[in-house]
Image (tube, rainbow, N blue to C red):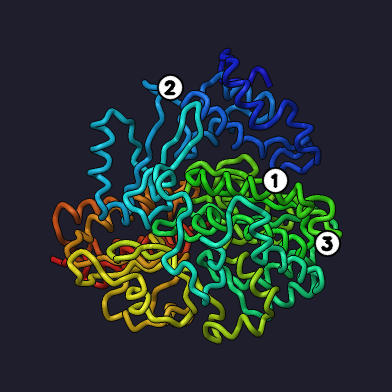
Amino acid sequence: MADLFIGPDLADDLEIAAITAAIGNDPAVVHETERLVIGGGARRRERRHLLLPALHALQNAKGWISPGGLNHVCDLLQVPPAEAYGVATFYEMFRVDEPDHTDAVTHVCVDAACQIAGNEELIADIETAGGHVHRSPCLGQCERAPAQFVQGVGESDHVPADAVAVDIRVPQHGEPSLRLLANVGVVDPTSLESYRANGGYTSMARAIELGPEGVCDAIADSGLSGRGGAAFPTGVKWRAVAAEQGRPKHVVANCDESEPGTFKDRVVMENDPFAVIESLTLAGFATGAENGWIYIRGEYPLATARLQNAIEQARAAGLLGPDAAGSGHSFDIEIRRGAGAYICGEETALFASLEGFRGEPRSKPPFPTTHGLFREPTAINNPETLLNGLDIVAHGADAYRGRGTEGSPGTKLLCLSGRVAKPGVYEVEFGITLGDVLALAGGLTGSGTLAAVLMGGAAGSFVGPEALDMPLTLEDTRERGTTLGSGVVMAFTDEIDMTAVCTRISEFFRNESCGQCVPCRVGTLRQHETMVQLGRSGSLSDDRRALIDDMARVMVDASICGLGHTAASAINSALDLGLIGNRT
């Protein structure tokens, strides 16, 4: 491959040491299985899934990915340099041009929750003090807006707010009604002993008693649906993977929580990491998967460190490994950090990213249950969904159905932010009204007069004050033309410039579209152009509004993945409510 290299540049000792620490001396030893590489047409030893860790190591070593460093990675992993360069340029956190400084970079969020909480003042303060700022999409810290994340050079990445309040607790801390959040603030997140003393691994013991089929039956009977936004029945997914035989299987925790306004999984991972490990182990046992993966967004350094610590302690205690938790089933877990790409929250884009490719979605079918990670059977769920599995197995499907509604059983984690007095993660039973949720969060701040609530994040939609009586269930939100999505409930009061908020939402989708399909690539660009024009003129012509509607229909009908399907939802709902775009 030497003739394919970017140039004659060689990695220096610092870069080589960083790469070696990240992926080991011999990648072939790190990952011994041979896999069929689709598109290459030949079987070779697969090393490519180590590309992301290697790129993170290079970025951290010098603050950018040099040609020499990339050459060394390509030589070790046998990845064509052009493809590795394409991967490096895909992500927000990587730089391929040498910076004019070697200092850490502070990422400051510019999305809605931080946009209305003084992010521009924070940026000005950092720059005045001589700091280097990168304007970043949502950092998953909406409850402590304006959010910042420091990307280190020669030192670990960190979140300044974590040093002030390492153990972030939910506002409902200690309430007996909590199920998914019961351990937060109670269990020491760094101690397996503390977790087990508070009931940890009792669900796994019960799962072993039930057997894999019994666990899948309990999950299916409970009516549990995915909590990432699509609400797909979890039992159907797990049974489909369990039925696959003769090939390696995987379970993946989708911890790439990048939907603007969403931070529930971060709070869980930081404060109850052993529960995430146990729940993923349970999913592996139920489906017959021996390989567990956690794909976590790169801007979550504390959650990543605590999950890695939890894995190591669980492995040392025999809860992971050849006889995981005494189940007779071999199961282990690896962590992969994302690098700032909203699209990688889409399951097939996540697989591509984890495998070492650009995070571009794949067409479906085939579906992940038969052709997921490495084109092998895969069950993928987010942490909230997985934690529900622990509750169901421990207490039974009937007890689980005793909470919530018939169509939406159980509890839901909601991310309250924006103009509320007590932003944070709340656990509520399905069926609570939107107005009661806002009251639970202490009511409104700002002017105190509600203009709108963004439901489900940037991919969701706005609802007006008339929706305060809406029960928060899958069926009721669907009937009202909105969504619970990933659990975002972001309040806006009437003094806020909603045109500026919606313009930023349109810019977000323009930037985050992977560009693979024309409807999304062009539609998101034209939508943002229209919003910029609206900001200048203050109104929309009938023809321009018709164009927005046409673009939305095309993106919904013809885009490959959910990004294009939902990129116009918030903008169109704001127009329908009259929050923006008075017609001329």
Q: Which residue is mark 2?
A: 98
205 with respect to 450 (left or right): right
In this view of the protein, can residue 366 be seen by the observer?
A: no
Tell me: residue 284, above or below residue 5.
below
Front label number (2 vs 3)? 3
Tag 2 near tag 1, CB within 8 Å = no
Tell me the CA gap for discs 2 and 1.
36 Å
- Tag 3: residue type? Ser
Earlier sequence position, callout 2 versus callout 1: 2
Which residue matches tag 3? 327
Between label 2 and label 1, give the one nearer the viewer: 1
- Which residue lies at the image location 26% right of the left edge and 57% below the top edge? 501
- Residue at image coords 36%, 51%: 508
Q: Are marks 2 and 3 in contact (CB under 8 Å)?
A: no
Whole-percent x, y for residue 59 in the image: 51, 29
What type is the residue that disc 1 sits on?
Answer: Glu
Q: Position of residue 427 (x, y in %)?
A: 48, 71
SS state under label 1? helix
Q: Earlier in the sequence, mark 2 or mark 3?
A: 2
Position of 131 compared to 234: left or right? left
**Which residue is label 1 attached to?**
312
Q: How far is mark 3 from mark 1, CA to CA? A: 18 Å
Q: Residue furthest top?
A: 8
Query: What's the amino acid at mark 2?
Result: Glu
Give neighbour class at mark 1: few <14, some 14-19, many 20+ (Cα, 10 Å). some
x, y percent for residue 111 = 33, 52
